[in-house]
Image (cartoon, helix red, strand yellow):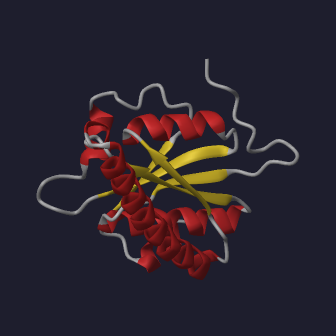
């Protein structure tokens, strides 16, 4: 059974969880989350997930090198996204790097941090569809998630998000 959210209890604050990846829609989700957090006295958690399916099949040294390179790339992305969030809202987001499947790691971090109250995703704008995470919503993959999901249209401008957030 999922633990009760604590985001409105004394000593806690509501956090918005954003998946930090290299997709264009990541910026839309981060912008929305940072604006909402700033306006509601909350925080932002940025999750970067390393997907290293091939690493276990590699020699130990190669696997370690793959992991180190992926971690460096994730940290560099988080540096840029942190600066972006600070510029948007003045909030210094929490940064988390995990290894594994994206859905599994999203579930794990929400279970571990009782202050995470909302998962913010943004829909892609390409002809291929809204993106794999948004598409997985229709398959019921997120039915057991203990927090609501906010989906930000990827076509919204900063000004349009400001009016909503």
User: Of all residues shown, which one is farthest toward the bottom?
Assistant: 87
Q: Quadrant of the C terminus?
A: bottom right
Residue 48 in picture, x, y percent from top left: 45, 55
Give the farthest residue toward the top: 1
**Residue 62 seen:** yes
Looking at the picture, does residue 53 appear above or below residue 140?
below
* Residue displayed at 38% across by 76% down: 157
In the depicted structure, whether residue 96 falls above or below residue 140: below
- Residue 122 visible to the viewer: no
Question: Is residue 77 rendered to the left or right of residue 14?
Answer: left
Residue that extends furthest to the left in the rendered view of this protein: 127
Residue at the location (43% across, 74% down)? 160
Residue under the point 74% across and 62% down: 41
Which quadrant of the structure image shows residue 114? top right
Which image quarter is the N terminus in? Answer: top right
Q: Seen in the image, is 92 located left or right of residue 24?
A: right
Task: Provide residue 138's location: percent of width, then percent of height.
Answer: 28, 34
| Nearer the observer, 104 or 36 | 104
Location of residue 124 (image quadrant): bottom left
């Amino acid at each position: 059974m999922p633990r009760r959210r604590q985001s409105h209890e004394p000593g806690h604050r509501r956090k918005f969880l954003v998946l930090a990846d290299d997709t264009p829609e990541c910026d839309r989700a981060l912008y929305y989350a940072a604006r909402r957090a700033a306006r509601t006295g909350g925080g932002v958690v940025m999750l970067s997930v390393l997907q290293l399916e091939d690493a276990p099949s590699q020699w130990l040294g190669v696997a370690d090198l793959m992991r180190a390179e992926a971690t460096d790339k994730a940290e560099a992305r988080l540096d840029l996204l942190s600066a972006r969030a600070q510029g948007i809202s003045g909030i210094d987001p929490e940064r988390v790097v995990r290894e594994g499947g994206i859905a599994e790691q999203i579930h794990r971090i929400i279970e571990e941090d009782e202050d995470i109250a909302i998962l913010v995703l943004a829909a892609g704008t390409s002809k291929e569809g809204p993106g794999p995470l948004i598409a997985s919503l229709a398959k019921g993959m997120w039915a057991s998630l203990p927090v609501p999901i906010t989906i930000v249209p990827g076509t919204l401008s900063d000004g349009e998000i400001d009016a909503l957030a």
